[in-house]
Image (spheres, grey):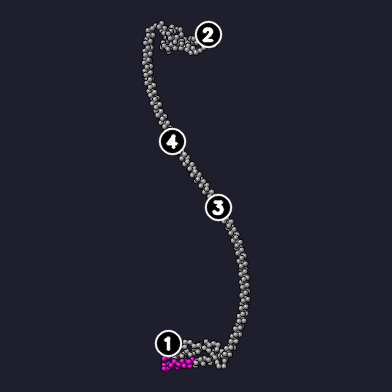
């Protein structure tokens, strides 16, 4: 039922009644249901389980009070007592039982606690033993693993050391190679520097020695060329002079030759006119000169020794000289003695 419905029923049931009357009606209803429920329960049940007792009363009385427009929201039993203290004695007995049970429970709990403590200690020891065993196993495995790790570390360390040494050797080799390359580069640079120094020295020599020398040589060459030109000009002048002198001398010689030729021609013509006596006179005039020419080499001789004792040989030498006489006279005078009968007879020249 809703609150409005309950309110309508309550108004209908309790209209004209005061609050006390309403309380009495509700109380009587609840007391009646309480007595009926007490008849179904034992004293121990009522005393020991009050909540269940109150629940039963609330369930049984709720429909009746509901028809009055009242809803039981809460119903509790504050206390249960009697006039002869039965319930009190029952409580003491119950208390003693409870105390006994409590002591037994405590003893059992202590026993169980001791057993459990022993079991726990045993379990703890077992766990400790197992833990120690596991720790020992773990230590042994750790030592084995550590040994294996140490061996592996040593191997890796050796490999790393070897690799480091190899890498160091490679680095040293690379450094040495780079040093060699640097030395080569430095040597090339040194060679370049030396080449530059040579070029600089050469330029310096050119500037300080060669160029002055070339200038001096050029000056000397210019002087020499000037002197050469001078000498050429002098030679040309001298040659021109000589040529002029030669031409003059040639002209003189030519004139003299012509005069001599004319003289010889006139002389020849005179010889043609002369007789043999005149020609002989000319020959005789020339003979001293011929004899002087022939005897000129003998003027330097202090003594002549004739080794041959053969008179015929001396005679033959004289005859040979006489035979050569016409040629000499012809060369000196231009007169051919071979054509003069007397001389021809004297010298024995054959025409």
Q: Between disc 3 and disc 2, whose residue precedes? A: 3
Circle 3 sits in a helix, a strand or a loop, which is it?
helix
Question: In the picture, which quadrant includes the N terminus?
Answer: bottom left
Q: Between disc 4 and disc 2, whose residue precedes? A: 4
Q: Between disc 4 and disc 1, whose residue precedes? A: 1
- Closer mark to the observer between disc 3 and disc 2: 3
Compared across the picture, whether 144 is left or right of 179 comes to right
On residue 168, the disc is: 3
* 192 is within the stretch colored magenta: no
**x and y percent of residue 99 in the render?**
60, 85
Who's the residue at 62% across and 76% down the image?
Answer: 117
* 27 is within the stretch colored magenta: yes
Task: Report, in whole angstroms, how far the alpha carbon at label 3 lies from the one at label 4.
Answer: 59 Å
**x and y percent of residue 206 in the render?**
45, 37
Who's the residue at 53% across and 8% down the image?
Answer: 311
| Residue identified by numbered label 1 | 3
Q: Are marks 4 and 1 in contact (CB under 8 Å)?
A: no
């Amino acid at each position: 039922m809703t609150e409005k419905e309950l309110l309508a029923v309550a108004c209908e049931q309790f209209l004209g009644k005061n609050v006390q009357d309403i309380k009495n009606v509700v109380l009587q209803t609840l007391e009646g249901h309480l007595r009926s429920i007490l008849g179904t329960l034992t004293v121990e049940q009522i005393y020991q389980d009050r909540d269940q007792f109150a629940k039963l009363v609330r369930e049984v009385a709720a429909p009746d009070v509901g028809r009055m427009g009242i809803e039981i929201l809460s119903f509790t039993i504050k206390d249960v007592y009697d006039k002869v203290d039965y319930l009190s004695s029952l409580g003491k007995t119950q208390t003693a039982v409870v105390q006994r049970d409590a002591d037994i429970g405590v003893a059992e709990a202590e026993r169980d606690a001791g057993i459990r403590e022993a079991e726990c200690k045993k379990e703890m020891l077992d766990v400790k033993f197992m833990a120690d065993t596991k720790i020992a196993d773990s230590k042994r495995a750790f030592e084995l693993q550590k040994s294996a790790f140490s061996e592996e570390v040593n191997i890796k360390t050796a490999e790393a050391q070897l690799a480091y040494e190899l890498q160091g050797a490679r680095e040293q080799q690379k450094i040495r190679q780079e040093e060699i390359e640097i030395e080569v580069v430095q040597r090339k640079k040194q060679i370049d520097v030396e080449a530059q120094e040579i070029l600089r020295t050469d330029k310096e020599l050119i500037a300080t020695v060669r160029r002055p020398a070339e200038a001096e040589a050029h000056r000397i060459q210019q002087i020499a060329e000037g002197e050469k030109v001078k000498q050429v000009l002098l030679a040309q002048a001298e040659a021109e002079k000589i040529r002029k002198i030669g031409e003059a001398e040639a002209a003189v010689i030519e004139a003299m030759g012509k005069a001599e030729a004319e003289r010889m021609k006139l002389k020849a013509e005179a010889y043609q006119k002369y007789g043999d006596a005149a020609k002989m006179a000319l020959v005789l005039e020339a003979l001293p000169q011929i004899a002087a020419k022939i005897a000129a080499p003998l003027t330097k001789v202090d003594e002549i020794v004739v080794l041959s004792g053969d008179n015929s040989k001396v005679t033959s030498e004289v005859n040979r000289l006489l035979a050569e006489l016409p040629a000499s006279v012809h060369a000196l005078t231009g007169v051919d003695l071979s054509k003069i009968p007397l001389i021809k007879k004297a010298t024995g020249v054959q025409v």
